[in-house]
Image (cartoon, rainbow, N blue to C red):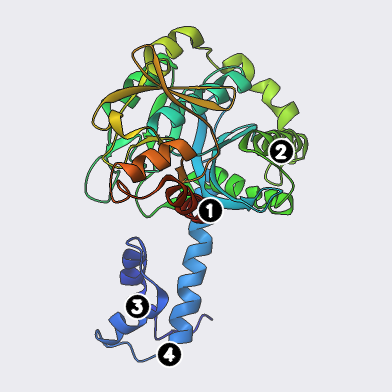
Amino acid sequence: RAQPSKIDPFRAIIGEKLEKPCTAMALYGFIKTLGYSGGYGLVRNYCRSLGEEAARVATMRFETAPGQQAQVDWKEDMTLRTRDGTPLRFSIFLMVLGFSRAKYVEMTLDRTQPTLMRCMLDAILYFGGSPAEVLFDNMRTVADRSQGEFGQGRINAAFAAFAKDCLFEPLLCKAFHPYTKGKAEDLAKLMERLRPYDGEFSSPGELNAIVRRLLDGLNSEASQATGRKPSEAIAAERPLLRMPDADAVRRQHLDRPAMRKVSRESLVTFEGCRYSVRPKFVGKTVELVAKDGTLTILLGKEIVSTHPITGKRWNFDKQDYIAIMKSKAYRDVPDDQVERVAESNLGIYDRLGAM
């Protein structure tokens, strides 16, 4: 016969408080004030059993039919070094189809809304269409208001329009319930397979090629959850996916000119990184054009500056930097001394800018 336990009178309130969530130690301290006389180990083990059961229920609940759902997330702020030792900080966009576990990953240098939209369209084309719904974490690029315990989330207008044109319904995870997007989180853990490539690439483009090879391998491996290879299981999903008009989506949501105002430091921001221009352009609004690994900065039809897209936080053209120095504290300093200081400072920026 089951023996009574000191924790029995407190089971209901422990289950309720774990929804917040709370740690076992916090709950132990709380129920002691309510008269609990047992030890911490009993509370810890009971909380652990509830967590395992919730995970089992969640796994069953979030298995979805073919073509029904995908999950999206990011592997944020990874850092690997190039062959010359320069650190490159980047993120990985992640999307996985719920039924087949077919995966799509892409390296990015930021997590802005335009980047998210571009990656999503790339993923949709890779899969062969959109599922009926896509589940997101409460990321600011998707939601104006998070899906919380006490209110409904709200998709922002720009992303809602993009989702409509891509033929999927965006859904938000409930706050404090990360297991609802467990497939995407499992995929994020697999990105640790990139670690051996530290020092084995020379540019962001070369690293993205490595990421693409990793993607091909992941889709050829049998899923631990289903026992099937995603590259084969997706055959049951593709007839149920809906293909949007990709050209129309690009025109409407992605092909708008990237306009930036030049800061007082003579810098413009692109994909989370700063690039220099001459001081005479401070305060002016310029257009940024990225193509073939090069960022071109334009004022009307005039080319203001060009830079290789590096992923570093700060990117200074040497002549831009000298002009910036001469417009400020080094106005009356001889040219040769300015150049020596500029080279020294730029070396520091190169070391710090990629960290």
Looking at the rendered structure, which numbered label has been put on residue 226? none
Q: Secondary structure at mark 1?
A: helix
Location of residue 48 in the rendering, given as x and y in whole percent from the top left corner:
50, 71
Query: Which circle marks residue 26 in the picture?
Result: 3
Q: Residue furthest front?
A: 334
Q: Position of residue 72 (x, y in %)?
A: 49, 37
**Relative to 279, is 87 above or below?**
below
Q: Position of residue 256 (x, y in %)?
A: 37, 16
**SS type, badge 4:** loop
- The quadrant in which residue 211 appears is top right
Quadrant of the rendered structure where residue 14 is? Answer: bottom left
Which of the two discs, 2 and 4, sits closer to the camera?
2
Tags 3 and 1 in contact by the CB under 8 Å rule?
Answer: no
Gap in angstroms between the C-alphas marked 2 and 1: 28 Å
The residue type indicated by label 4 comes to: Gly
Q: Which numbered disc, 2 or 4, marks the residue that appears first in the sequence?
A: 4
In front: mark 2 or mark 3?
Answer: 2
Q: Which mark is residue 210?
A: 2
Task: Name which residue type carries label 1.
Answer: Gly
Residue that badge 1 annotates: 347
Q: Are marks 2 and 3 in contact (CB under 8 Å)?
A: no
* Closer-to-camera residue (181/203): 203
Compare marks 1 and 4 and give the one earlier in the sequence.
4
**Mark pair 3, 4: CA separation:** 13 Å
| Distance in Å between CA atoms under marks 1 and 4 | 59 Å
Task: Residue at 62%, 22% (x, y): give it.
Answer: 126
**Mark 3 or 1 closer to N-term?**
3
Q: Callout 2: helix, strand or loop? A: helix
The residue wearing badge 4 is 39
Name which of mark 3 and mark 4 comes first in the sequence. 3
